[in-house]
Image (tube, helix red, strand yellow):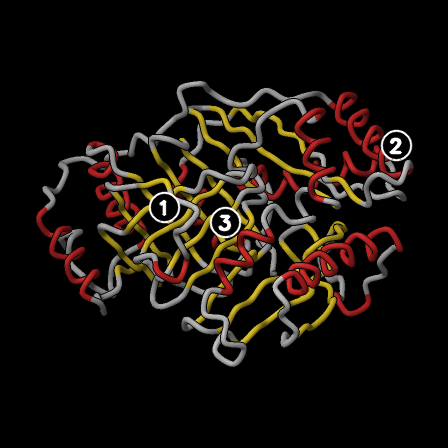
């Protein structure tokens, strides 16, 4: 069978070959690539973009064409990848086109010359290599400094992060597939651009979604416990520290609604969710944009929310100042956000958590912990280790599938 045929009988190995062929050609042309799978969905989606652009402040989510958005932790520079070509895969098969964009994409795909041998794509690497970060003692000291600031009454919460390098020559496409299998309720993403390099992630945290162009959603996600197989999520006992940490994120979202005088919203939760090897407390917020006559709510809330208190702290300006002064490295895309925009009529942007930056035979894995007045520095270190294991376990294939 030719790899360019749209068929529901592609084998797993042939799907990988098709991905390799598409990505190899894209990277030869200097194009950017975004491959993702939304939570609780079996469709894997792929965008090829040769015309990435830096968005301006006046650009709105609602008016953008089909594409994929990438933003770093530090607000200001947002990259948009318009979809020159777009493909969907399910059950190891390339799905038949159902839009004009997909029709054009399949026509383009048929014109590619088939490689005689499987080609492993040369994913982009950042020229400046990987970020350098501190050791265990330095991170514990960072957390202790944050606790001092909180006890002085200058902040309610600060989210210091860290990263560490892993030596591993792993296949990124295989790792993406494994993440899809193990974490069905997470947003799984693999992006590679000349500007950002290559990032792989599995995040449980929705930042902003717009369904069918009129239903806005966001979540308050915080608090972390290790998940043990067989644990009933309905009977999990949370500490006061974890409950308060999640409540701070809730209050932050509600304060954003108040800033724009939005009163008509639905709130559900908090409830315990299982995210791979971890559990969190989560509350869901929903707004009918048509009923509230707020057609650009997604854009407005995105500007207000990012970076959220779940990845930065409260108050935002104090927490940011502390992190910029003491954290000691640039987070880049870690705890920024990414996701599809106006794809199949929907926008879904997620906080880029549980992620790694790839660099040849190395990867740098990132994680942070929410520090409040009741935090203990060594426990926050252990929390970052648990979070990093989400991806490390996939790289080394040391973990069984987790149900989310």
Q: Is residue 252 left or right of residue 332?
A: right
- Pointer 3: residues within 10 angstroms few (<14), some, or many (20+)? many
Q: Nearer the viewer, residue 9 or 22?
A: 22
Q: On the picture, is 159 further left or further right than 67?
A: right
Cα distance between the residues tagged 3 and 1: 24 Å
For label 2, the crowd category at 10 Å Cα-Cα, with few meaning under 14, some 14 to 19 and many 20 or more, is: some
Query: Which quadrant holds the N terminus?
Result: bottom left
Q: Is residue 82 above or below residue 9?
A: above
Residue at the disc numbered 2 = 148
Residue 92 position within the rendered picture, expressed as x and y whole percent measured from the top left: 33, 58
Residue 313 rendering spot, x and y as whole percentages: 72, 44
The residue at which mark 3 appears reads as 179
In front: 357, or 254?
Answer: 254
Q: CA distance from mark 3 to mark 2?
A: 38 Å
> Which circle's residue, 3 or 2, is located before the other in the chain?
2
The residue that appears at 11% across and 56% down in the rendered structure is 107
Location of mark 1 (residue): 80
Instruction: Tell me if label 3 and label 1 are in contact, CB under 8 Å.
Output: no
Q: For numbered disc 2, what is the local secondary structure?
A: helix
Residue at 77% x, 34% y is 381
């Amino acid at each position: 069978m030719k790899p360019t045929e749209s068929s529901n009988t592609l084998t797993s190995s042939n799907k990988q070959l098709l991905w390799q062929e598409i990505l190899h050609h894209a990277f030869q042309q200097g194009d950017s690539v975004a491959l993702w799978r939304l939570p609780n969905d079996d469709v894997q989606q792929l965008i090829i973009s040769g015309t990435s652009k830096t968005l301006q402040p006046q650009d709105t989510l609602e008016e953008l064409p089909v594409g994929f958005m990438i933003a770093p932790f530090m607000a200001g520079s947002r990259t948009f990848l318009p979809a020159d070509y777009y493909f969907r895969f399910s059950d190891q098969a390339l799905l038949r086109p159902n839009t004009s964009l997909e029709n054009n994409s399949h026509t383009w795909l048929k014109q590619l010359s088939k490689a005689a041998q499987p080609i492993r794509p040369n994913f982009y690497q950042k020229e400046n290599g990987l970020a350098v970060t501190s050791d265990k003692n330095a991170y514990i000291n960072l957390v202790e400094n944050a606790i001092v600031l909180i006890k002085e009454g200058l902040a309610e919460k600060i989210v210091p992060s860290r990263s560490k390098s892993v030596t591993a020559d792993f296949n990124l496409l295989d790792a993406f597939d494994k993440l899809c299998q193990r974490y069905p309720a997470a947003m799984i993403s693999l992006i590679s651009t000349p500007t950002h390099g290559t990032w792989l992630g599995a995040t449980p945290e929705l930042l902003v979604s717009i369904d069918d162009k009129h239903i806005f959603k966001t979540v308050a996600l915080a608090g972390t416990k290790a998940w043990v197989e067989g644990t009933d999520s309905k009977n999990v006992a949370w500490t006061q520290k974890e409950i308060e940490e999640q409540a701070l994120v809730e209050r932050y979202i509600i304060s954003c609604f108040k800033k724009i005088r939005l009163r008509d919203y639905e709130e559900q939760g908090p409830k315990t969710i299982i995210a791979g090897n971890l559990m969190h407390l989560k509350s869901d917020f929903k707004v009918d944009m048509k009923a509230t006559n707020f057609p650009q709510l997604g854009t407005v809330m995105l500007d207000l929310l990012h970076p959220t208190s779940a990845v930065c702290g409260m108050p935002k300006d104090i927490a940011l100042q502390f992190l910029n002064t003491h954290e000691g490295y640039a987070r880049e895309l870690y705890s920024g956000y990414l996701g599809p925009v106006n794809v199949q009529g929907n926008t879904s942007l997620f906080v880029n958590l549980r992620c790694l930056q790839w660099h040849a035979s190395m990867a740098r894995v990132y994680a942070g912990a929410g520090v409040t007045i009741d935090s203990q520095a060594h426990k926050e270190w252990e929390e970052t280790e648990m979070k990093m294991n989400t991806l490390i376990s996939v790289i080394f294939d040391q973990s069984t599938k987790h149900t989310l």
